Amino acid sequence: MSHYVNFTIADFAKKASGVTVYHGEVTALNIAGYLTQVGALRTAIEGIIDGVIQKEQLVIDSTVLTKLPASDPQATIKTKWLVTYRGASNENFYTLEIPTADETLRYDGVYWNQRDNMAEDDPAYIAFKSAFEAIAKCPDDPSMGVALLGIKLVGRNLS
């Protein structure tokens, strides 16, 4: 059985897109820690997007966080962060897209990063990496942790 959390993210034009992160089994013994990890991941995603997370869906719950569109006019679901990660021990590569990317995170304080990668020393990157690796599991093996490889700015859906 797959275990995951899904966030629905809206842009300024009221368009929505989602991102799904797979994780391990939730039990009575680990639910408190799991909910803390989900909250940390939500906060980390909010730190790298211009849009607004409208809904959070867990395999055990579904919560509408807001019905309002994003207040930032730069928020568009066409601009996304492409998150690349791998299995901790199987070395398989995986990707997910997070809509309404905050493009200003490409800026390193001196000049624009021409590769569109988020700097690994950026506080938003560090927060996302920590929250993501704490909760995410491989989509094809929910017992295996993951390692974040990078976050890159992309356009429309790649799939």
Image (cartoon, rainbow, N blue to C red):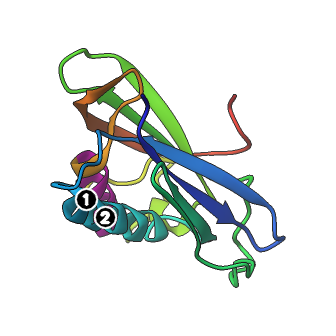
Give the magenta-colored segment's residue range: 122-133
127 shown above or below 95: below
Amino acid type, label 1: Ile
Measured as percent of width and height from the top left, residue 16 is found at 74, 59
Among all residues in the image, which is located at the extreme right?
13
Q: Which residue is mark 1?
A: 31
When the figure is inspected, residue 32 is found, relative to residue 73, above or below; the finding is above
Residue 19 in the image: above or below residue 158:
below
The image quadrant that residue 74 belongs to is: bottom right
Q: Residue at x 69, y 28 (%)?
A: 159
Q: Nearer the viewer, residue 16 or 143?
A: 143
- Residue 25 lies, in percent from the top left, at 29, 40
Vertical comparison of 127 with 144: above or below: below
Q: Work out whether residue 100 can be spotted.
A: no
Magenta region includes residue 11: no
C-alpha gap between disc 2 and disc 1? 6 Å
Query: Mark 1 falls on what kind of element?
Result: helix
| Residue 62 quadrant | bottom right
Residue 135 appears in the rendering:
yes
Q: Are marks 2 and 1 in contact (CB under 8 Å)?
A: yes
Q: Position of residue 73 (x, y in %)?
A: 75, 78
What residue is at 68 percent from the left and 81 percent from the top? Answer: 72
Residue 59: which disc? none
Judge from the rendering whether residue 144 lies leftward or rightward of residue 18; answer left or right: left
Quarter of the image containing the N terminus? top left
Q: Position of residue 101 (x, y in %)?
A: 58, 60
Q: Label 2: which residue?
A: 35
